[in-house]
Image (cartoon, rainbow, N blue to C red):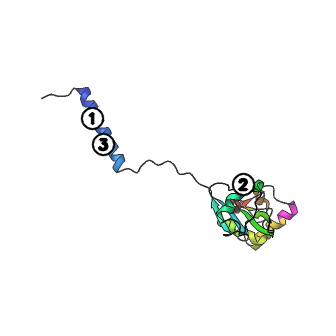
Amino acid sequence: MRSFSLSQQWILWSLSFLILLLLYFKFFHPPFLPPEKKVQEIAVEIEGEIHRPGVYLFHHPPTLRELIEKAGGFKESTRFAEELSSETLPSGTRITIKKRSPDEIIINIGRMEAYKLLVFSLPLDLNRVSPEDLSLIPGIGESLSQEIIAYRQKRRGFRSVEELKEVKGIGEAKFQSIKKYFTVE
């Protein structure tokens, strides 16, 4: 009977360990997965002279043409200006399509209503938000919304979200809890 040398025994032991390790990872350990990328969805609303008005979600900023196609196209055959079709739309945009004549459409580009923006976790513009819409934010009641509007009027607008700290009734804790709901455009 032949015996193995010490170096051969070491190699056999190492190979056995490697095989056991591979079997463990194959059957008992979850597979190695790449870290999940956080995908930001772009929410865009369309209404008016199209087949399926509503809010549509995209994984990239859509063009006006992509949005109209996803909404089923125009209700009636309409010529579409190519220069408008390549314009990309940021999240929170609202498109309204009106027909002026059989050959002419009017496309209004605006912002979605505040409650829709909040549903999609999109911030409200501090310089445009109404007192009623401010009251939709958790932690902001009627009196605090009036203070924010009064500050905005006195200062002729907010230059940054951090200016909220200067509004009467907003301390550091309150600011930290509400800052994610706002932007300044």
Looking at the rendering, in which quadrant would you find the N terminus? top left
Q: Nearest to the eye among marks 1 and 2: give it.
A: 2
Magenta stretch in the rendered image: 151-157
Q: Is residue 28 above or below residue 50?
A: above
Front residue of 102 and 74: 102
Of the numbered discs 1 and 3, the one sitting upstream in the chain is 1
Q: Is residue 120 visible?
A: no
Of the numbered discs 3 and 2, the one sitting upstream in the chain is 3
Q: Quadrant of residue 115?
A: bottom right
Measured from the top left, where is residue 160 in percent x and y? Answer: 78, 55
Determine if the magenta segment contains residue 136.
Answer: no
- In the drawing, does residue 14 fall left or right of residue 49? left
Q: Residue at (80%, 70%) from the top-left corner?
A: 146
The residue beneath circle 2 is: 88
The residue beneath circle 3 is: 20
Q: Is residue 51 visible?
A: yes
Q: Nearest to the eye among marks 3 and 2: give it.
A: 2
Mark 1 residue crowding within 10 angstroms, few (<14) / some (14–19) / many (20+): few
The residue beneath circle 1 is: 13
Measured from the top left, where is residue 16 in percent x and y? Answer: 28, 38
Q: Quadrant of residue 154?
A: bottom right
Q: Residue at (83%, 63%) from the top-left corner?
A: 152
Q: Quadrant of residue 78?
A: bottom right
Measured from the top left, where is residue 40 in percent x and y? Answer: 62, 56
* Alpha carbons under labels 1 and 3: distance apart: 11 Å
Label 1: state its secondary structure. Answer: helix
Q: Residue at (73%, 64%) from the top-left corner?
A: 94
Front residue of 91 and 65: 65
Front residue of 163 and 33: 33
